[in-house]
Amino acid sequence: MKVAILGGGSAGQGIAGYLGLQGCTVSVYNRTPQRIATLRKTKTLKVSGLVEGEISLHTVSCDMEDVVRDADYILITARAFGHEGCVRESLPYIKKHATICIFTPYFAALRLHSLLEDTQREDITLAETTLLPLASQVIAPDAVRISGIKSKMRIAAFPASRTEKVFNSLKPLLPQLFPGKNVLETSLENYNPVFHVPIAHYNVREIEERPDSFIFYHDGISPKIAHISDALDTERMHCISTIGLPLSAACEMVKEYYGVKGDTTYDIIKQWKAVESYVLPDPLSYVREELLFGLVPLSSLCEQLGCKADTMNMLITSWSTLNQEPYWKEGITVTDLGIDGMNRDEIISYVEG
């Protein structure tokens, strides 16, 4: 199977290594040459951690055409800021009936499906998964360490009538996949904002002073900060239940995906082995992503459905002041998702096609 991975950071290299060890032909694209300079020369990636070995990469390039033109699957691991650019730039070169799958989508399928319509590339299947399948870190210019592998991960396509096809095609590559009902499930199930935004908010001084050494989850969590995450997740779950989706609370997902034990959010994060030494690269840029593509659209959806969103609204407003950025103005809303003015039943009908 030929796979193109768009994004050469820790996530992209982790998935490249994971799939390469399974025998896939893997190519990697990155927008900037510095991150992949060594890989472009050697085309060799060393993998350590939960799986180990060394793989040969087929193509490593900053030229989109070189990477995607023969690929059956285009897997986007770039951050949410880069989703649209990756899809827009790759579409002219993707072969017919290929699949684009975006990991950690932040409503990507709803945001981007019009690009396929506008370019008459509706032969392509656009799908998304709730989160990344792995926890991984680049530890050298040609080496990545995989510290966690999720036991299960939801996938859905837009429209939902294509989910079964994309699930069946990607299941051999990622056996932890299971099909979701629609792309609302995959995007609303994303628990990253629940943890990232409160932890960063209440550790902002530490992050500013040592952004490259702050162990984000284990150093950043405290019982009181965990209370903020719990309040935020309660609001997320109220919105989810209002729509009628069968999703779990954030901590229950961590326990299920990674086999973590614990009775409280604080205990669960402190015992979460996959992230125990994880230094989140550029933490404040992650917060910006979570706000613009995570909490602002969630708040917008809560407002439309009449759900309480006091905690998320407080965090959005506070971060807007801290970073001097108009997150309320610049963030994604229900209008951008194409569901403005719809009630619960109309939203479900729209995403399920």
Image: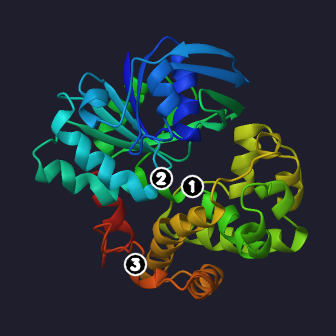
For mark 1, what is the residue? 190
**For this view, does 202 lie left or right of residue 35?**
right
Residues at circles 3 and 2 in contact by the CB criterion of under 8 Å: no
Residue 323: quarter of image? bottom right
Residue 11, quarter of picture: top right
Element assignment for label 2: loop
Q: Which sits earlier in the primary sequence, circle 3 or circle 2?
A: 2
Q: Residues within 10 Å of mark 2 (few under 14, many from 20)?
A: some
Q: How crowded is mark 1: few (under 14 residues within 10 Å), some or many (20 or more)?
A: many
Task: Give the label on residue 148, or none.
Answer: none
At 89% across and 69% down in the image, what residue appears?
Answer: 223
Q: How many labels does the image show?
A: 3
Quadrant position of the N terminus in the picture: top left
Residue labelled with disc 3? 330
Residue matched to label 2: 79
Residue 241 lies, in percent from the top left, at: 56, 66
Amino acid beneath label 1: Asn
Report whether residue 41 is seen. yes
**Of the residues under marks 1 and 3, which one precedes in the sequence?**
1
Q: Which amino acid does label 2 sit on?
A: Arg
| Placement of 120 over or under 118, stated as above or below | above
Front position among marks 2 and 1 = 2
As measured in the structure, the alpha-carbon distance from the residue carrying label 2 to the one carrying label 1 is: 14 Å
Q: Is residue 7 above or below residue 244?
A: above
CA gap, disc 3 and disc 2: 17 Å
What amino acid is found at the position of numbered circle 3 in the picture? Glu
Choose mark 1 or mark 3, whichever is in front.
3
Between the C-alphas of marks 1 and 3, the distance is 20 Å
Is disc 1 placed on a helix, strand or loop? loop
Q: Is mark 3 on a helix, strand or loop?
A: helix
Q: Which residue is drawn at 66% across and 37% down?
A: 136
In the rendered image of this protein, does residue 217 appear above or below residue 261? Answer: below
